[in-house]
Image (cartoon, rainbow, N blue to C red):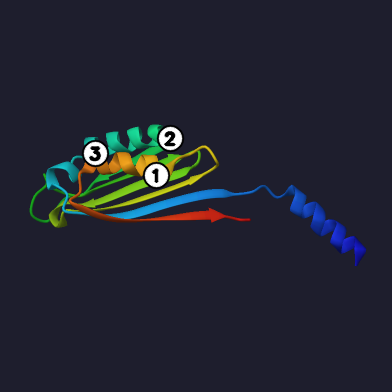
Amino acid sequence: MAKNVTIEREREVALYKVVGKHVYANLFGIDPGIISDLGLVEEAVIEAAELGKMHIVEMIKYKFNNLYSTDFGGVSVIALLKESHICIHTWPESEYATIDIYSCGDVSEPMEAFSHLLIRLKPKKYEHHYIQRDNK
C-alpha cells in the first residue's frame, strides 16, 4: 500500500492547476446591420481578445445567407486563442446573438473582452453567466 500512496503523491505533484474562466451570454435587440456585418464582428472579436489579454492563433469566420436577404444573413466568428476561444454567432432576423468566451490562465480577463463586445454590438438587453472552471 505504501507504494501506491507514493505514486499517487507523485502524480498530484505533477498535475498543474487549471485556471479556467468561462463567460457566455445571450444578447437581444441588436441592430441587424451591426450583427450581419462580418467585418465589424470580426474586428470586435480581435479587439476583445487584445483587451482581455488573450492571443489569437487563428480566426474562422463565415457569413450565412438569410432566407429573405443576402444582406442580413447571420455571421459566426470563432477566434482560436492560445488561452482557448471566443465565439460569436448572430441571427440578425431575430436581433439576437450569442457569445462564448473561455480562457485559461491567471492573466486573461474574459470579462474585459465581454464588456468590449457589449460596447461594439450594442444590445438593448443581455444576460450573461460567469463560471470559474478549475481542477482544484
Determine crowd level at label 2: few under 14, some 14-19, many 20+ residues with C-alpha closer than 10 A. some
Q: Please tell me the numbered disc located at residue 82.
A: none
> Circle 1 is placed at which residue position?
111
Figure disc tally? 3
Q: Residue 134 lies in what quarter of the image?
A: bottom right
Q: Residue at x 76, y 49 (%)?
A: 13
- Which amino acid, mark 3? Arg
- Quadrant into which the C terminus falls: bottom right
Closer to viewer: mark 2 or mark 1: 1
**CA distance separating discs 2 and 1:** 17 Å
Residue placed most toward the observer, 98 or 61: 98
31 vs 108, left or right, is left
Q: Residue at x 61, y 56 (%)?
A: 135
Q: Residue at x 43, y 35 (%)?
A: 56
Q: First in sequence: mark 1 or mark 3? A: 1
Q: Is residue 23 above or below residue 50?
A: below
Closer to viewer: mark 2 or mark 3: 3
* SS class, disc 1: helix
Q: First in sequence: mark 2 or mark 3? A: 2
- Which amino acid, mark 1? Met
Residue placed most toward the observer, 95 or 66: 95
> Residue 60's x, y, as percent?
35, 41
> Circle 3 is placed at which residue position?
120
Q: Is residue 36 above or below residue 135?
A: above
Q: Please tell me the numbered disc located at residue 56.
A: 2
**CA distance separating discs 1 and 3:** 14 Å
- Which amino acid, mark 2? Ile
> Residue 100's x, y, as percent?
37, 51
